[in-house]
Amino acid sequence: MAELRRDPVVGRWVIVDTDYPHRPEDFDYEQNAPQSTSTCPFCYGSESMTPPEIEAIRDRETQRNSPGWQVRVIPNKFPALQVEGDLDRRGIGIYDVSNGIGAHEVLIETPYHGKDIPDLLNQEVEDFLRMYVRRCLDLKKDGRLKYIMVFRNYGSAAGASLEHPHTQIVALPMVPKNALEEIEGAKHFFEYRERCIFCDMIRQEMQDKERVIAENKYFLAFCPFVSRFPFETWIIPKKHSGHFCQITQDEMPELAVVLKDVISKMKKIFPNLSYNYIIHSSPVNSDSNVEFYHWHIEFMPKLTRVAGFEWGTGFYLDQTSPELAAQYLRSVKE
Amino acid sequence: MPELRKDPVVGRWVIVSTERSRRPDEFSTFKHEDAKELPCPFCEGNESQTPPEIYAIRQKSTYKNSPGWELRVVPSIAPFLRIEGDLDRHGKGMYDLMNGIGAHEIVVETNKHVANMADLTEAQISKVITCYIDRMQDLEKDTRFKYVLIFKNYGYSAGGSKLRHSRSQLIATPVNPKRVKEELAGAREYYNYHERCIFCDLIKQELASKERVIVEVDGFVAVTPFAARFPFEIWILPKKHSCNFVNLDMPSRDNLARIMKIVLSKLKKGLNDPPYNYIIHTAPFRRQKVGYWKSIDNDFHWHIEIMPRLTRVAGFEWGTGFYICPLPPEDGAKFLREIEV
């Protein structure tokens, strides 16, 4: 008998297949294969192919928009949103429209075309994570922006349009629906119990242990009880903190270690895996008063195809229980 | 400048990218992956390879699970949910769970090995619609179920299997799914304020402006929605207000079959046989909670949503519920309008 589990934050139900759980070898996922090698705009020497850089970590005495950088941030060449202009919301009959005010940046984590996070040194991971924070703090200064989302699509099956690894940062003039739902759910719990729902979750996960993958002083990595996707993994700071920007100097190296560890384990089990991760964080500026929210990273390996049932219902089918997935991930040898 | 559009019913925002837009014909780069020549369990003559049939439209004096049928419903061999047992809800610390009770049925839409519903006759599609209605009415009798989702996954990247025999699926769930609730709540909120059905208003506006209308037949209209999530997303709506798909009368079933055939054929011809999903959005079963569904007869309006799968959903969409549609729905509608079928 399959088990239905309800997400405690947003109330979404997930079907967990406990009868015939998929083993890692049962997934027929799209392998991430190297693409034809035309000139990559994110490699050394191609800096002029991208819009001018916003910020970079680079060697001393190297020029902007030239080689010699370690992490580079540029505006998206095809932005979904643009910084210029005033926010203009209007109606067309029963419909509402707004212009696309916001920011859409691309953060290139490494000049090496073929290096994914597991191939980087801990220090290099830490460097680009620091850049995430710097960009968020900078974007936050624009009072029109209400929500900043940092996300990474790796591999074509996960929607990456360029092969060279990169992260995207989007700043929006409104809090998007999914984030709002999560915040509302957490708020509801907080009003009732006067506790953070995510802190409760961390407590229960550390006690149960069966869904925990890795742990260090400041972070916990686990497969959530209500995983939407097989091998979905969350990385969460153990200490309550609403916004990713608030991460401390001490926490940063530990986050780099746990992030690299999770992705390394995942790619050992699933070679050539495509994946997404998203940093879930509190809104910024006028909508930022959220003591009940707790930032975290949601990591989603792309092993299955979302079909009509999921679209229609918002119900997900998880073919490997999170307990089993955590067991596989825990047992990966370094 | 890209435009942000808000879905009037569920409040989802969509970014309609206008500058980077690809031309409509640039989306059709799709290749179907076929299963190796397996004997198809859904073809006439192979009835013993499926679980015993639940329902069939068959010639007189033919036996169950034998040839002589035009349409057949069988339980899924890999069901998400199972029909046996009682509902058991319980908690585990802070988490809630329930056993997986439900029904998962496969509607085999034809006895021939035809892949795309677009290639069935109107008469056959009409039978499929009748079958959906009969199955829903039957499942409604089971008081454990609250909702039946009818959907189709056509093509491998739409979540279909590599076995290409035209079929759809029906899943009865013991809870009202979240997306359904959101849609119902959005429609009710609009009704409470305006005392009009939001979908009727939407149809009126679309028929007046025409720019997103793909085709109209007697009683139905097919449009690309204003806040489309995907390029060439299509909604088929009955022009006459009705919250429940099950109440569709016989002549209307034929009209619906006609517009479905036209729309699916346009997709197939114009976009090189793309994978797609469709979902019937209809009212839930209304037996519990007296008074709860007070205004649903007036506020909700059943319809079909068709989603061609030409782009990949990536981190941004998952994280925000915000979609980026690389083709303005007006351009999609124009392109499909002009495809002759």
Image (spheres, grey):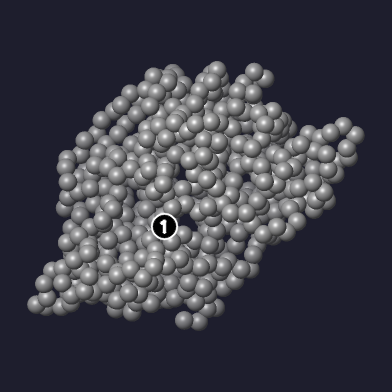
Q: Nearer the viewer, residue B18 or B314?
A: B314
| Residue A249 sits above or below residue B84 on the image | above
Q: Which chain hosts label 1?
A: B
In the displayed structure image, the side of residue A222 where residue A45 appears, left or right = right
**Whole-percent x, y for residue B61 in the image:** 9, 77
- Could you say which quadrant of the image residue A204 lies in? top left
- Label count reads 1
Residue B99 appears anywhere in the view:
yes
Q: Nearer the viewer, residue B270 or B67?
A: B67
Image quarter in which the N terminus of chain B is found: bottom right
Residue at mark 1: B159
- The secondary structure type at the circle numbered 1 is loop
Q: Residue at x 32, y 31 (%)?
A: B96
**Whole-percent x, y for residue B210 in the image:** 53, 70
- Could you say which quadrant of the image residue B150 lies in? bottom left
Q: Amino acid at mark 1?
A: Gly
Residue at the far front: name it. A333
| Residue A143 sits above or below residue B274 on the image | above
